[in-house]
Amino acid sequence: MKLYPLLFITIIMMFSCTSGPIVIPEDETPSKIIQSAQEATDANKYRIAIQYYQALLERFGDNSEFYCIANYEIAFIHYKQRRFSEARAGFEHLLNLYNAEGGDALPRRFKVLSEMILANLTERGY
């Protein structure tokens, strides 16, 4: 009978450690959002990092630099998680932007990095 309280406490602790949606102040700067996302990624809190990058897209997605950063980083998180089909779709989306009209004005580094990772995925059969 003494196991039930222990089991109950264990279950409560497990659910209290899971994180729901994050709250990002409306006046948060893009740089702070990116920094928070990178810190979450470094801590292997990928779901939280993606939430930050999605907020960056929602709030500052009309800026091509921030749009590319967020999309690249989300695709890269999927790649790190071995969710290769989602990663491939994200990298291909970015490359399609570079191949579209005006794509030459986008930050070049994300095109180069996306091409390298896609080549790696293709080489590995993903």
Image (cartoon, rainbow, N blue to C red):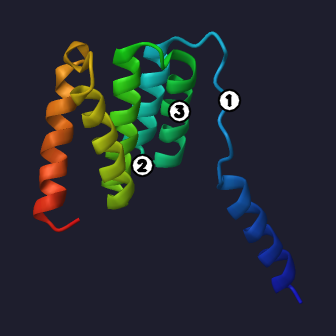
- Assess whether mark 2 and mark 3 are in contact (beta carbons under 8 angstroms): no
Q: Nearer the viewer, mark 1 or mark 3?
A: 3
Q: Nearer the viewer, mark 2 or mark 1?
A: 1
Q: Which residue lies at the image location 35% right of the left edge and 49% below the top edge?
A: 89
> Residue 93 placed where, x, y %?
34, 39
Taking the image as shown, residue 11 lies to the left or right of residue 37, namely right
When asked about the image quadrant of residue 107, the answer is top left
- Per the model, the C-alpha gap separating discs 2 and 1 is 19 Å
Q: Earlier in the sequence, mark 2 or mark 1?
A: 1
Q: Nearer the viewer, mark 3 or mark 2?
A: 3
Q: Is residue 118 above or below residue 27?
A: below
Q: Is residue 88 above or below residue 10?
A: above
For the N terminus, the image quarter is: bottom right
- Per the model, the C-alpha gap separating discs 1 and 3 is 12 Å
Q: Which residue lies at the image location 30% right of the left edge and 52% below the top edge?
A: 88
Q: Which residue lies at the image location 75% right of the left edge and 69% below the top edge?
A: 11
Identify the amino acid type marked 1.
Answer: Val
The tag on residue 44 is: 2
The tag on residue 117 is: none
> Residue 8 placed where, x, y %?
82, 72
- Per the model, the C-alpha gap separating discs 3 and 2 is 17 Å
Taking the image as shown, residue 124 lies to the left or right of residue 107, namely left
Q: Residue furthest right?
A: 1
Identify the amino acid type marked 2.
Answer: Asn
Q: Is residue 26 above or below residue 21?
A: above
- Local crowd at mark 2 within 10 Å, few (<14), some, or many (≥20)? some
Q: Secondary structure at mark 2?
A: loop
The tag on residue 54 is: 3
Q: Earlier in the sequence, mark 1 or mark 3?
A: 1
Identify the amino acid type marked 3.
Answer: Gln
- Local crowd at mark 1 within 10 Å, few (<14), some, or many (≥20)? few
- Residue holding disc 1: 23
